Image (spheres, coloured by chain):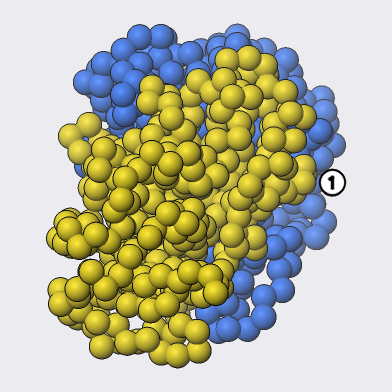
Chain colours: A yellow, B blue
Amino acid sequence: MSQTFDIAVVGATGTVGETLVQILEERDFPIANLHLLASSESAGHSVPFRGKNVRVREVDEFDFSKVQLVFFAAGPAVTLSFAPRATAAGCSLIDLSGALPAEQAPQVVPEANAQVLAGLKKPFQVSSPSASATTLAVVLAPLRELLDLQRVTLTASLAVSTQGREAVTELARQTAELLNVRPLEPRFFDRQMAFNLLAQVGTPDAQGHTLLEKRLVHELRAVLGQPALKISVTCVQAPVFFGDSFSVTLASARPVDLAAVNAALEAAEGIELVEAGDYPTPVGDAVGQDVVYVGRVRSGVDDPAELNLWLTSDNVRKGAALNAVQVAELLIKDLV
Amino acid sequence: MSQTFDIAVVGATGTVGETLVQILEERDFPIANLHLLASSESAGHSVPFRGKNVRVREVDEFDFSKVQLVFFAAGPAVTLSFAPRATAAGCSLIDLSGALPAEQAPQVVPEANAQVLAGLKKPFQVSSPSASATTLAVVLAPLRELLDLQRVTLTASLAVSTQGREAVTELARQTAELLNVRPLEPRFFDRQMAFNLLAQVGTPDAQGHTLLEKRLVHELRAVLGQPALKISVTCVQAPVFFGDSFSVTLASARPVDLAAVNAALEAAEGIELVEAGDYPTPVGDAVGQDVVYVGRVRSGVDDPAELNLWLTSDNVRKGAALNAVQVAELLIKDLV
């Protein structure tokens, strides 16, 4: 019999946590016992796993020495509270909240920098980057040498599910109110989200950058191993339920060989290249899929050293939950 | 009594044409007789003007010698058919279709290059650029010298009204079907537009660029008077009814003086600068307004020679109809 592990998922009732549990089942992750954990408000709920409803318990009362690996899929405050307790109990962890510093838990996207895992000591601590950074890293990694990548300029149009289940409900509610010509009273968002674009996701700092934008820059540089890479980023909230989209302009050190770019994208793991003339959409392609869709591959209108791409991926699945599980799959052979 | 003119509007029943007639009335354009024209399918409809319903007649049968100025607010084919007849009759024209070459009818955005009008001969022929180029020109013109502008990288998220009234109806219809959990059968768009982003507006050429993207590049260069300006552009169709939005990254030849940028934008005509920390949206700010809203003014995360902006404007009104009327207001003093 092959080896199995005891695993915990913190934040099991959130959009990412629930998808993570589903992916562990789909990919037949070698689990002996699965412990689903959440804050006291969500404890008592249950989440389906292997045909049973697994009861969600309070993370506060959990003994981390019972598991070899824990996924932190709740907010940064939860990770900061419980990560020390987990590692003290000898439990390895994969954090999806962005709470831990890179020195403690390096950012890993298996398609881009799996080699980082080889240098870690037990108990392992790994960060799974933000959905945006993960999606971009999957696509830029196979291109970075080919292009001698100088600069990334991008606009990220994020799905409302990036902000959790309440945001999804709110977009549906607002849309229904408007279609029924009822007065709109924004609740989750501070203004109309339906049929609108919100150009700022979160509160900006004194320089005007949001945490999400700064996190994307730092994580993408870390995962690509290019700490000085120039990255310009705007994160926008789009009236889309699931699936983030990215309009990306890359500056190369030399004229771009489009045939080589297409070949590299075709050959890469985790990418589905859409044929020229067509393009992928979040709803029609990305949602529920394990790959990042890439389309509109083209040079600049008259700059041959420019490469433009359109990316879309399932922010909850490919951007977050699946990446964490992929990291876990690479770690398990050394877990015990 | 001050002088008045006889004016014609071709395409008077379209979204832009109707708004144009409304703006002529609002701004008290000195009109003696207004002739509303359209193709034979739309002839017979009527459009309100100064408290009366003006009957729309067939452009085919119109005698252009009856007017001193005609606006072409229909498609390029209509302009190409009737512009020669208008100018042969001594009638000046303002074209909104993009059909006429720059040598014949230069692109003009009054806030950016009104001086071009002084060089024209009668009958005048002027092009009012695409809504995207107009919006961008209004904002970039007061910045071009301050920044010594080197490169513009932008993602345009276009409202469905860019594609006319049918596209507006289709977004509403698709949204209602989805909210009522009925099967979606796309009609106007070739796929789901509701709660989705379509990364390609129109058919791309062999290099992957759409006509809209190439038109934007050429028009923006022409209006800014920078024929070699590097412009990278992606036009995306967003599930928004009215109001185009632009995520813009500008490369300057030197570190950007943000205070000077803000002062220049504050002082400029046709712009409303939204205070730092807040941001404008198409629905909440731009729709129905005569200005381009600018927000999220910031440098790069760590590139001081970069300037990022978020723009939004009413594509039908500020982007198209109003710009044409503003051009007309500058031309009329020399019309007769």
Q: Nearer the viewer, residue B327 or B59?
A: B327
Secondary structure state at the residue bearing disc 1: helix
Above/below status of B177 relative to B49: below
At a point 34% along the width and 56% down the height, the residue shown is A94
Q: Quadrant of residue B100?
A: top right
Location of mark 1 (residue): B60
Please identify the quadrant where the N terminus of chain B is shown: top left
Q: Quadrant of residue A165?
A: bottom left
Q: Quadrant of residue B70?
A: top right
Question: What x and y, as percent, mark residue A248?
Answer: 54, 36
Q: Is residue B115 left or right of residue A272?
A: left
Q: Is residue B150 left or right of residue B302?
A: right
Question: What x and y, as percent, mark residue B308?
Answer: 37, 30
Q: Nearer the viewer, residue A150 or B313?
A: A150
Q: Pointer 1: residues within 10 angstroms few (<14), some, or many (20+)?
A: few
At a point 77% along the width and 46% down the height, the residue shown is A275
Q: Chain of mark 1?
A: B
Question: What x and y, as percent, mark residue B97?
Answer: 69, 37
Q: Nearer the viewer, residue B321 or A301?
A: A301
